[in-house]
Image (cartoon, rainbow, N blue to C red):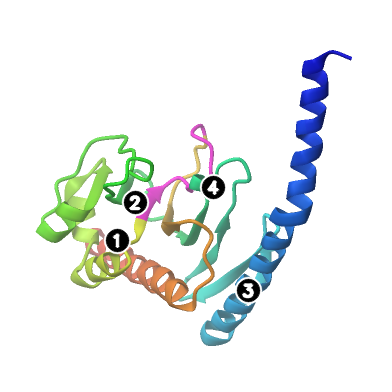
Amino acid sequence: MYPWVFVLVLGVILGIIVRWLFIRPAEIEFKKVAREAMEKQALKRQGKLTVAQRMPALIIPYKKATIDLGYISNEADSSWEYTYARFRTDNFPNKKFSVYANSKDFFTKPLAIGTRVELVDERLREKFVVTGNDAAFVNDLLTDEVREKLLQKPLHVKFGRRIDSSTVSRERGWLTVFTQGNRAQDELFDALIETASLLYERLEVLSAARE
């Protein structure tokens, strides 16, 4: 047997052992904690507990929409893991934007792809990187209440494709409020859901105003 084959096989075996002894038990424990936290949210918001991508998830009825609370996991790269609240709307199908909390850390600094949007709120300009195809629309959407919510955590927002969809996906209309990493905290869940709710209501107001 070639030495490199032996090393490769040994590496695979060690990877399997590490996963079963350390990573898998941690994942099981997190899912348990996440489920308990989501059960609390389900009672608070009359939601339905379910499973998405083998992770606990919650479907919350909100007016004419539903808000999904859940996780995006990535075994290969934890920097692409998110905790999110999102909903889909048929309003403004041609609009798209991203609001990312800025970071001084090189590895977590947002990659702003698209036309930069100048925000009217000076506090947000200092702490967020925003791109989109309609600056006036973005500024109209970010009401005082929404801005306060974003500044408290801070949170990210994306409107257009789902954050876990492929770049060739033609589906639009998803508004996602999210934070990096898989986290199971009641306070964070509240912030994600409440911010998504505020943005849903604002989209309804802007839609009604143009009719």
Name the disc covering residue 78, or none: 4
**Chain-order first, disc 1 or disc 2:** 2
Determine whether, in the image, residue 156 is placed left or right of residue 168. left
Chain part drawn in magenta = 157-168
Rendered residue at 35%/55% (across/down): 157
Q: Position of residue 205 (x, y in %)?
A: 27, 67
Q: Would you name the residue on which mark 1 appears?
A: 207
Specify the quadrant of the image occupied by residue 51.
bottom right
Q: Main secondary structure of the magenta part?
A: loop
Gap between marks 1 and 2, in whole Å?
A: 8 Å
Point out the residue furthest to the front here: 3
Q: Earlier in the sequence, mark 1 or mark 4?
A: 4
Is tag 4's residue or tag 3's residue first in the polypeptide sequence?
A: 3
Along the polypeptide, which appears first: circle 3 or circle 1? 3
Q: Position of residue 69 (x, y in %)?
A: 53, 66
Residue 72: in sight, yes or no? yes
In the image, taking residue 95 as reference, residue 80 lies left or right, namely right
| Image: 147 above or below 112 | below
Residue kind at label 1, given as amino acid type: Ser
